Amino acid sequence: MFTGLIEETGIVKSVGWNHKSAVIRIMARRVVEGLKTGDSISVNGACLTVVSFDGNSFAVEAMGETMNRTNLGDLKPDNAVNLERALRLGDRLGGHIVSGHIDGTGVILSFHKEDIATMVTLKADKDLLRYIIEKGSVAIDGISLTVVKVDDNSFSVGIIPHTSQETTLLKKRIDEKVNIECDMIGKYVEKIMLKGKPDEIKSRIDEKFLMENGFF
């Protein structure tokens, strides 16, 4: 488990492909402190296992599923990535509960400055957007963020100066791909209450359903 509070940005040193899987070596300083083989590290929000390390870098393995379904498959040497070590018992949970299991990807539509913050609008598939709610939590490339606005095709988050300095998000380009992990609570609630397939959800949630379950 992770918090979505990025500890540092690392620099990709190499991506060694093996058919569909890859070994990614990343240069870093803070996250290698106390590191052990087998530890979990979030790389752009994806939970990966450390297979080797030294004083200023570490290597992780990523299977084909991970490389295909996240932006890790687009990584090249010298790219910057967001890094966070796994949460330890007793640590403060300053962000929100992040599993490191990416639900899908989105693309950046726009950046808009508002006072001290920068509003970032992202396009995502409807299968992801149904779990994203206004003022709810979402992890973008591993960064714990609060949703400012959401509509049928996109959602927006606000980036404060500290987050801008400590992460890669505002260094990205329009149309660049990002990893998205939705708040897991919503997914579990949906599974338990509806016990159906995604294409059945719209037909099962109506005014009668909401009244019967205490929402009215």
Image (cartoon, rainbow, N blue to C red):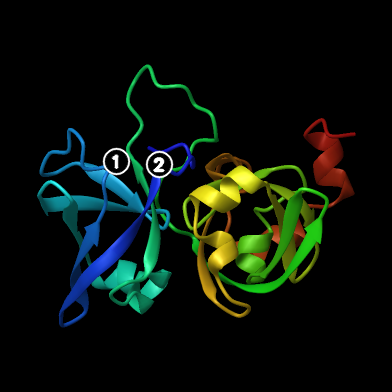
Marks 2 and 1: CB-CB under 8 Å? Answer: yes
Give the position of the N terminus as an image quadrant: top left
159 or 65, nearer to the observer: 159
Residue 163 appears in view: yes
Q: Is residue 184 above or below residue 169?
A: above
The residue beneath circle 2 is 7
Q: For this view, does 212 lie left or right of residue 100?
A: right
Q: How many marks?
A: 2
Q: Earlier in the sequence, mark 2 or mark 1?
A: 2
Q: Amino acid at mark 2?
A: Glu
Classify residue 98 as left or right of residue 129.
Answer: left
x and y percentages locating residue 37 in the rendered image: 10, 44
Q: Could you say which quadrant of the image residue 10 lies in?
A: bottom left
x, y percent for residue 27: 24, 57
Please, which residue is most extreme toward the top here? 90
Give the image location of residue 154, x and y in percent: 73, 68
- Measured as percent of width and height from the top left, residue 82 is found at 41, 54
Q: Is residue 16 above or below residue 189?
A: below
Whole-number angstrom distance, CA of label 2 to CA of label 1:
7 Å
SS at mark 1?
A: loop
Please tell me which residue is depicted at 37% across the width and 78% down the height of the picture: 74
Image point (74%, 50%), residue name: 117
Is 70 drawn above or below residue 83 in the view shown?
A: below
Residue in the picture at 54% in, 35% down: 96
Q: Nearer the viewer, residue 163 or 45?
A: 163
How packed mark 2 is, by other alpha carbons closer than 10 Å (few <14, some 14-19, many 20 or more), is some
Q: Considering the numbered disc 2 on the image, is that residue within a helix, a strand or a loop?
A: loop
**Frontmost residue, 6 versus 27:** 27
Name the quarter where the C terminus is drawn.
top right
Residue that numbered label 1 is attached to: 30
